[in-house]
């Protein structure tokens, strides 16, 4: 462990542009990422709202839709963009680049990230990538319709394969490739910062679990996004340069013989899922870290099994790279390899279960305080369990003969990757808002938000499991063509109504977030009586976090309810002789 | 100090959370038990094995699900802040070891058990006497090809594919074996006889899915993928496409007719006459 005097430190900027736009300060960059994610999540949610209305009332006239009544290709374009924006611009940015940027350096007692310029570059590269991807909406051929997974050859053939497969798909590929660059830079920065810039006394096993989660996530990002970048470049070449990485010979599309040969559609799937599965963990691991952190804080109790939690994080990260084939059980891949992928996937259930049991163990015997962040952390555990157990069905190739590519999958990944990660984001936002703005978010509004959102997400996604059991394929814009789908229309109607209400509740959150920045109740330095380093600096923290006086760490991150101490928490930075004894 | 926060340890919130988790868990169990939305009845032997494996998985994950949700609800209610201090505990290695071992055995064991149905579908090839039918996915239709009376499939070549001439497969007009091939937009098979499907795709990836067979397989351009089944119940079943293939994905429907041997022969003769 080294402490660099120079590492990351730089002078405070004076002009507006260097302070708020092209800032080198990790805290400003973190907030920039959060605002980008906030914008994206509302765009993504609006797209899903349009889709939900179409599924419930297929002939409804809709705003923002050319021609009023949604066509199949418009539905698929909304779906593709919803998935892309949510996965990349929300679930990858907010938990890791947003909160991680802001709090990782402070929690390890550093003045900034190791490479502030690269940090700034990674945000602005992400911004460009978002602009390029959104531009796909405005080209004449329309946004891409091949889903966020963009399976080749549908995504590789170009305009001949249908509407949306022209310039829109090209922009999508380019935007994603740029995003890969941004994420790779961010990952390098996170890893270097965690290894090099920890303050005196902060050994690896004294790091908060949030830091562990961001660290492991950064390693996953470094290994996964490089592969996606390569895949995107190959796909782009297939589309614009006439190569045939993913297009085999002898294809006849729209009654025309395609002049490609020798490519493999399965190669795209292997490359995509080698990235795509770790991506799921990139979205969820930071949420796990935040949940552990907050559960301990508001149970007033140390994290149960800290070491087991660290090993489980690393285990999930490692196994996450060994299971991509479970997305391909029915793809035509060798059925023998399905066995290996299946058993490895089932074993990911083990570290996941360890985490769940340890969260319960943390609550057990605690003195639980029901603040809004705590409610969302408890909600996180519940939705993580619900989303996790359905994974044990999908990990079995024989069950996928029925369940693959049905709404059961939609339900599963929305619960575990969407809802659980978003609950992690809400937990983090309500928890750290006082530190970021010196004011607290409104508790009554926060609780209202929770009490609509928590039952709401279950009411939206639980019924989708049943649609999947019946055999309802995903990515269908219309149910009228199949006799077995028609009776399911009323389920879609129910989901749409609940989705309406739940989405409306997110406006409460948006209002609370914006209003509290200016009018929230002022808070003290450490309003939650927490132990980690971010609660030792002013709110908001000064430019170099610790005003040049980097702290020293004397103990683990979750020393709550320590016998013999006057307070029920002992902060990491207090020297043993400074800890007040109980009388 | 600990009592500063007005919402700390609120009994109402604790009770509401616990009650919600209890009701949600019970409702989920009820909906699964009632089977109001459920699989259609399977018409293959491995389909019945898949259903049994589903129930085994449901049992094990159900126990994990119910215990976790209820334990969460209980902990939230029981350990709400009522003053005093929490237990100072950093965990328990014996418990960590036990639940690691238990979940490992349960989950991996379940995974090993699941391979039985998978092996029947994919490891054991079709028997030599199985009835061979080619399945072609294309935007946005299914076509099926029978070898005709000579029992031989005619040669195919991409340059002959012409939808406007009804040559969906690209049958080579110079190959005698292809003259009697039967091409149909629906598929009929005799009941209780093994059928081997050979999947191909003309343009992009599609997925052949019949719920009652419990069978789904992508048809991938550039690949020939065999699957086999023996349907045990006469009836008409819908075929869907399960892999996004473009704007008409949701319209890609066809029918599987499972017929008595006599009806099947009659159907085949009618098709041959129509070619």
Image (cartoon, rainbow, N blue to C red):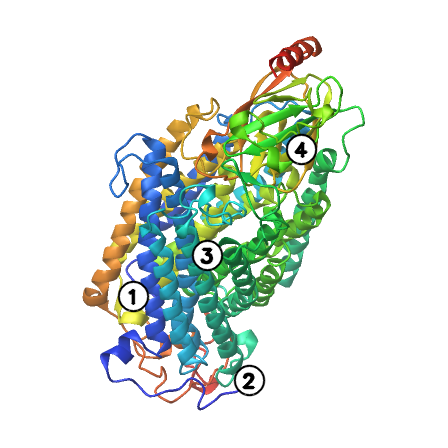
Locate the C terminus of chain A and report the quarter of the image it occupies: bottom left
Q: Nearer the viewer, residue A519 or B115?
A: B115
Q: Nearer the viewer, residue A51 or A392?
A: A51
The crowd level at tag 4 (other Cα within 10 Å; few <14, some 14-19, many 20+) is some
Residues indicated by labels 3 and 1 sit on the same polypeptide chain: no
Could you tell me residue B256's position as x and y percent?
59, 21
Can you tell which of label 3 and label 1 is closer to the viewer?
A: 3
Residues indicated by labels 3 and 2 sit on the same polypeptide chain: yes
**Rendered image quadrant of residue A7:** bottom left
For marks 3 and 2, give the CA distance. 40 Å
Q: Which of the numbered marks, if any, corresponds to residue A1?
A: 2
Chain of the residue under label 3: A
Residue at image coords 39%, 62%: A129
Q: Which numbered disc, 3 or 2, marks the residue that appears first in the sequence?
A: 2
Can you tell which of label 2 and label 1 is closer to the viewer?
A: 2
Chain of the residue under label 4: B
Q: Are marks 3 and 2 in contact (CB under 8 Å)?
A: no
Can you tell which of label 1 and label 4 is closer to the viewer?
A: 4
Is A543 drawn above or below residue A300 in the view shown? below
Q: Which element type, helix, strand or loop, lies under badge 1?
A: loop
For marks 2 and 1, give the CA distance. 38 Å
Q: Which element type, helix, strand or loop, lies under badge 2?
A: loop
For marks 2 and 4, give the CA distance. 67 Å
Residue pointed to by mark 1: B4
């Amino acid at each position: 462990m080294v402490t660099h005097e120079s590492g990351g430190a730089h002078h405070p900027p004076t002009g507006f542009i260097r302070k708020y736009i092209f800032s080198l300060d990790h805290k400003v960059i973190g907030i920039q990422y959060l605002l980008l994610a906030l914008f994206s999540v509302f765009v993504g949610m609006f797209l899903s709202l349009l889709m939900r209305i179409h599924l419930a009332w297929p002939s409804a006239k809709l705003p923002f839709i050319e021609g009023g009544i949604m066509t199949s290709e418009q539905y698929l374009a909304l779906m593709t963009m919803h998935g892309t924006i949510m996965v990349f611009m929300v679930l990858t940015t907010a938990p890791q680049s947003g909160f991680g940027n802001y709090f990782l350096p402070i929690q390890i007692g550093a003045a900034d990230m190791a490479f502030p310029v690269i940090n700034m570059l990674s945000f602005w590269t992400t911004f460009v990538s978002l602009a390029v991807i959104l531009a796909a909406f405005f080209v004449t051929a329309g946004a891409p319709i091949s889903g966020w997974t963009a399976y080749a050859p549908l995504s590789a053939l170009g305009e001949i394969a249908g509407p949306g497969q022209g310039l829109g798909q090209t922009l999508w590929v380019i935007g994603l490739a740029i995003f890969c660059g941004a994420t790779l830079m961010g990952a390098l920065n996170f890893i270097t910062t965690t290894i090099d810039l920890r303050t005196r006394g902060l050994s690896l096993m004294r790091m908060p679990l949030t830091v562990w989660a961001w660290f492991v996530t950064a390693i996953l990002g470094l290994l996964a996004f490089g592969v996606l970048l390569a895949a995107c470049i190959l796909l782009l070449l297939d589309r614009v340069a006439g190569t045939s990485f993913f297009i085999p010979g002898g294809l006849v599309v729209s009654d025309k013989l395609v002049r490609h040969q020798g490519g493999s559609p399965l190669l795209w799937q292997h490359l995509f899922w080698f990235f795509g599965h770790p991506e799921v963990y990139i979205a969820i691991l930071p949420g796990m870290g935040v949940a552990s952190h907050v559960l301990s804080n508001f149970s007033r109790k140390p994290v149960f099994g800290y070491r087991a939690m660290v090993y489980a994080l690393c285990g999930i990260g490692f196994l996450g790279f060994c299971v991509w084939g479970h997305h391909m059980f029915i793809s035509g891949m060798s059925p023998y390899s399905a066995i290996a992928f299946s058993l490895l996937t089932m074993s990911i259930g083990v570290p996941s279960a360890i985490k769940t049991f340890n969260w319960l163990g943390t609550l057990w015997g605690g003195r639980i305080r029901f603040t809004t962040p705590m409610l969302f952390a408890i909600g996180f555990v519940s939705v993580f369990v619900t989303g996790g157990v359905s994974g044990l069905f999908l990990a079995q190739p024989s069950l996928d003969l029925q369940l693959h590519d049905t709404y059961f999958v939609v339900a599963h990944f929305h619960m575990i990757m969407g809802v659980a990660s978003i609950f992690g984001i809400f937990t983090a936002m309500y928890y750290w808002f006082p530190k970021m703005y010196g004011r607290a978010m409104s508790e009554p509004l926060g609780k209202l938000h929770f009490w609509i959102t928590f039952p709401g997400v279950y009411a939206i996604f639980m019924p989708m499991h049943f649609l999947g059991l019946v055999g309802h394929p995903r990515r269908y814009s219309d149910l009228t063509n199949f006799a077995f789908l028609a009776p399911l229309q009323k389920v879609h109607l129910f989901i749409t109504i609940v989705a309406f209400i739940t989405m409306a509740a997110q406006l409460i959150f948006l209002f609370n977030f914006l209003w509290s920045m200016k009018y929230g109740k002022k808070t003290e330095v450490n309003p939650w009586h927490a132990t980690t380093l971010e609660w030792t600096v002013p709110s908001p923290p000064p430019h170099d976090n610790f005003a040049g006086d980097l702290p020293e760490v004397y103990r683990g991150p979750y020393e709550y309810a320590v016998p013999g101490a006057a307070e029920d928490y002992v902060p990491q930075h207090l020297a043993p002789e400074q800890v007040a004894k109980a009388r | 100090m600990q009592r500063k926060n007005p919402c700390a340890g609120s009994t109402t919130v604790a009770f509401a959370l616990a009650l919600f988790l209890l009701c949600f868990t019970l409702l989920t169990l009820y909906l699964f038990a009632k089977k109001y939305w459920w699989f259609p009845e399977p018409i293959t032997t491995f389909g019945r094995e898949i259903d049994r494996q589903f129930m085994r998985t449901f049992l094990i994950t159900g126990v994990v699900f119910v215990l976790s949700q209820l334990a969460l609800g209980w902990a939230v209610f029981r350990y709400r802040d009522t003053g005093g201090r929490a237990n100072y505990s950093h965990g328990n290695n014996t418990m960590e070891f036990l639940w690691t071992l238990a979940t490992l055995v349960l989950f991996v064991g379940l995974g090993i058990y699941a391979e039985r149905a998978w092996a029947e579908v994919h490891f054991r090839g079709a028997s030599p006497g199985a009835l061979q039918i080619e399945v072609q996915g294309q935007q946005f239709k299914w076509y099926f090809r029978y070898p005709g009376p000579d029992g031989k499939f005619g040669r195919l070549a991409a340059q002959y594919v012409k939808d406007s001439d009804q040559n969906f497969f690209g049958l080579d007009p110079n190959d005698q074996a292809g003259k009697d091939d039967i091409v149909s937009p629906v598929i009929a098979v005799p009941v209780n006889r093994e059928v081997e499907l050979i999947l191909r795709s003309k343009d992009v990836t599609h997925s052949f899915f019949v719920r009652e067979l419990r069978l789904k397989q992508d048809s991938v351009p550039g690949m020939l993928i065999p699957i086999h089944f023996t349907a045990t119940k006469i009836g008409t079943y819908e075929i869907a496409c399960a892999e996004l293939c473009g704007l008409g994905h949701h319209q890609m429907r066809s029918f599987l007719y499972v017929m008595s041997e006599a009806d099947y022969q009659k159907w085949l003769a009618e098709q041959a006459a129509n070619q």
